[in-house]
Amino acid sequence: MTELQADRASETLTTPRIETRSFRSRYRDILIALVAFAVLAALPFFFGSKALLDFVIRCSAFGLFATSLNLLVGYTGMISFGHGMFFGLGAYGFGLLMQRTGVPIPVAFVATLAITAVFAAIIGAICVRLKEIYFAFVTLAFQMLIHSTILTWASLTGGDQGLRGGIPRPVFFGIDLANHVHLYITSCALLVLGLLLMRQIAQSPFGYTLRMIRDNARRASFIGIDVWRAKLTIFVLAALFASTGGMVMALFVSGAYPEFAYWTISGEGIFINMLGGVTTFLGPMVGTVLLLILNDTVTRYTEYHGIVLGVVILFFAIGLRKGLMDYVLEWYAQRRDGPGERG
Amino acid sequence: MDIDALAGCLASPACLVTQTTSGLIIGMLLFLVAVGLTLIFGVLKVVNFSHGAFYMFGAYFAMTAYQLTDSFALAMLCGAAGTALLGLIFERVFMSRVYGADVLMQLLVCYAFVLIFDDVVRMIWGPEFKSMGMPSAFQVPPLFIAGGVVPPYYLLLIGVALAAALVLGLGLARTRIGKVIRAAAHNPGMVSALGINTGLLYGGVFALGGMLAGLGGALAAPVRSLTPGMGFSVLIESFIVTVIGGMGSILGALIGALLIGLIRSFGSLGFPLFTEGLMYLFMVIVLVSRPTGLFGKEVA
């Protein structure tokens, strides 16, 4: 039986087949992304409701954040409990650059990414050598450090009041982010582009290296992979996408608040991943939509939304033991394999 | 930054005594939370992310008991016993289901309970800041040691925490139950095969950890303001303590807690805006130079 498996393994390892398949699937991904963007962009012409557009913008912000967290949690097996710091960093970095320097939006966007990359590289260099639970808590500690810095450095960040006074939005390339529909389309574009890029990372040879590190870091290191460098690279990359999510959020609320850098954002991110499922690429996106709907409904009916959220988390963690997309996929696979196998 | 204030304080014995006592207070409270965390991790291999909630419940239980009975001793007892019971139930009903599951599941269950417990406290005691007030037995003029002010309650707090550390340390090292607990930390399967009910043992260890945190909360109630969410900041700091001291080491928790307490109290003089930052900086230095903490053992 082991021989059989070995045979099968060597068969799939023949390089040209993988090459063509990933080449084709790359075009498929781009096509899906284009269609998704077209559908989202057409939405305002059919439904004028501002609430719906607002919902999609929030989904974009949290979706970018949650999917980038999945690059760490699901693909590399690094459970970061401080990923939210980059969300906050993006929101504050972008907001401050726009308020203080008055540079054009694209410049501020790129500069914020650069700042995030520097922070992520420094924090990551310290954290990624730690294992599982240590990694989770040290990233959490850094999150709290950034949060408390934001609170105490009131002259720069506005302290617990947050960045107020709005974010100026000069028109660039004919895009006016003060216009609600323009803001909507821009967030959708950032979301779709971000997801596409993350998909490319996940499906690239580097993405498979990450999966290998997740499954067996020691073996990966034996065959010559620099585990530390690979982990640091994905830590920084994921931080960039989380930061983009933070920038979308800052534009949406026209400011930045200390809650964006608070640990609960990271907790929610982990929960979103759990809710949607970490084994599929779009799982976190599904989780985002579910959590936002859940949050909106629960807060409408009760002020104790922590209890409701907690019970839902328990249901998924102890009851289902997997995310919704994982569950659906398994169910689908069972259906497809037919009742013969089950019976 | 205010280096002069720090240097001035270090030069004056009165200030030195005051700051050291306040550092010891912070350290001892942290120790009581951190030692439970480290004990639970050492035996159950689970990081109890909701451990801060036990500290919070201990404080609220003590406050309510004190308001009802007006007895300080009873308040302490209620704080400790109530959280012990809570710990036992929490472990048996929920945590025992995620042993052996990956860290993500354990973190999620705890995260759910952080949310639930905070809201439960908000429901029962309300969202606003509460205070228990100093018990009348301790409303006496403070002691003066070398010119420094030391409230008698502080001495009691330090004494109780030190006694707890001593009892725990000796109990683990010398008694039969201590031996069983250490054995279970080492090889639970073998302990179970020798006829010891590990489920009960795990529940007991969790209850013990919860009780210590609850005692910490109860002791803190007269000197701190009570608010839902008060557990979380303590949790983060006690996690820093266990990381510095080494996960699973009781001596490490004590030393780590005292170091963090002193850093906080003296740091608030020299670097008022960067006190928290100092703690993290210290943790990073320890982690980079000794990844398993000061007293942690190398894990395979």
Image (cartoon, coloured by chain):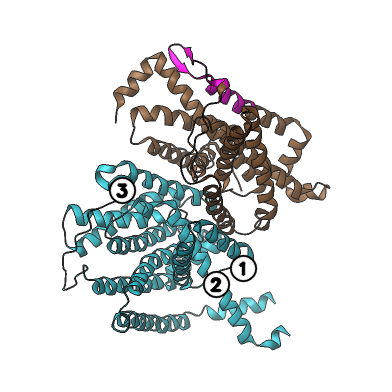
Chain colours: A cyan, B brown
Which label belongs to residue A36? none
Q: Chain of mark 1?
A: A
Q: Are marks 2 and 3 on the same chain?
A: yes
**Which residue is more in the foreground, B141 or A6?**
B141
Identify the residue at image location x=54%, y=61%.
A308
Q: Which residues are magenta?
A: B137-163
Mark 2 — residue? Answer: A324
Q: Percent position (x, y) of residue B66?
A: 60, 32
Q: Horizontal placement of B197 versus A315: left or right?
A: right
Q: Please say if A23 is above or below A142.
A: below
Identify the residue at image location x=71%, y=83%.
A342
Q: Secondary structure at mark 2?
A: helix
- 2 and 1 marks in contact (CB < 8 Å): yes
Mark 3 — residue? Answer: A161
Q: Residue furthest right?
A: B195
The residues tagged by marks 1 and 3 sit, at their Cα atoms, a distance apart of: 40 Å
- 1 and 3 marks in contact (CB < 8 Å): no
Q: Residues within 10 Å of mark 3 (few under 14, many from 20)?
A: few
- 2 and 3 marks in contact (CB < 8 Å): no
Q: Chain of mark 2?
A: A
